[in-house]
Amino acid sequence: MRFVLSSSAFLVLSLALVGAQEAGEATVQVAESESWGSHLTNAEGASLYLYLEDEGLEGESACAESCTRNWPPLTVDGEPVAGEGVDAELLGTLTRDDGSSQVTYGGWPLYTYARDTEPGHTKGQGLGRVFFLVSPAGEQVTEELVQEAPELDEEVMAQLMTEGERAFRNNCVVCHGAQGQGAIGPRLAGNSNVGGTAFLVQRIIIGFEAHGMPPFGHLSDEQIAAISTFVRNSWGNEFGAVTSEEVSNLR
């Protein structure tokens, strides 16, 4: 059974997870993700992100006002604390326009993402091609770890491909082309990005609004698994299946 949160309940959960952003202590630590490897989190396990628009600003943040609703800055009273695996020399702070002190790492201001409502969520990874997880070395994480695709019975795989082709033609063909050659949207044929399960599934669920791709989170886990499997195994792509269980874990 899947529970649907009201907007108020979602807000409460989001605020609870990112609670360390409010004035107080801030510990930066390292977590391991099956999809993205080692990356920084706050004390509650909420993933921390950098924003490429901050590059070169030197002590300022480009994420202000409405931006902070989705990307709350990690703030602190005093100095941030380095957890195990974190380089204390890379930790720092900057003063935001509202007077709060935001934690930085390797010069990058750190943010959480409002849709990451549980420890281990990385739903903000790569959004808009400007928000990225942060490695312990203070660099953006861009490469998804190669994972072995599940081996499915031939009949099950064939059914997934059939259902995926149908769902692709109903939802995706206008933008990506009937042969994955690209049109309004990018080419999928021979595109190594679709080999990343987390990347592909989360792009389908969340969309890529900066590039005109709407979210398709209204589709069922089974439909998204079928589309993903079809895309990953058509037009020369050979990346294996995606299961509905994997989709459910990535929502």
Image: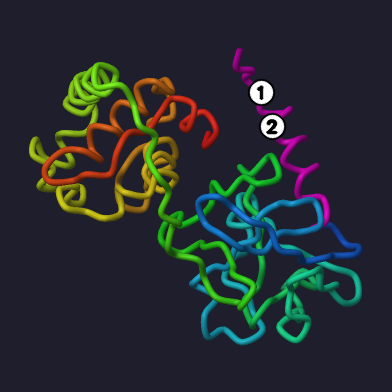
**Residue 177 x %, y %:** 11, 40
The residue to which callout 2 is attached is 10
In the structure shown, which secondary structural element does the residue marked by tag 2 occupy? helix
Relative vertical location of residue 3 with respect to residue 101 in this rendering, above or below: above
Q: Is residue 19 magenta?
A: yes
Identify which residue is drawn at 18% across, 40% down.
Answer: 175
> Tag 2 or tag 1, which sits nearer the N-term?
1
Q: The N terminus is located in which quarter?
A: top right
Q: Are marks 1 and 2 in contact (CB under 8 Å)?
A: yes
How dense is the environment of label 1, judged by Cα within 10 Å: few (below 14), some, or many (20 and up)? few
Identify which residue is drawn at 63% across, 56% down.
Answer: 32
Identify which residue is drawn at 77% across, 35% down.
Answer: 12
The amino acid on which the numbered mark 2 sits, given as a three-letter code, is Phe
Q: Which residues are magenta?
A: 1-21
In depth, the one of 77 and 27 nearer the eye is 27
**Residue 149 x %, y %:** 37, 40
**Residue 214 x %, y %:** 35, 38
Main secondary structure of the magenta stretch: helix
Position of 132 compared to 79: left or right? Answer: left
Query: What's the mark number on residue 41?
Result: none
Identify which residue is drawn at 54% across, 68% down.
Answer: 51
Position of 58 compared to 55: left or right? Answer: right
In depth, the one of 114 and 80 nearer the eye is 80
Q: How is the image coloured?
A: rainbow
The amino acid on which the numbered mark 1 sits, given as a three-letter code, is Leu
Q: Quadrant of residue 39?
A: bottom right
In the structure shown, which secondary structural element does the residue marked by tag 1 occupy? loop
Query: What's the mark number on residue 5?
Result: 1
How dense is the environment of label 2, judged by Cα within 10 Å: few (below 14), some, or many (20 and up)? some
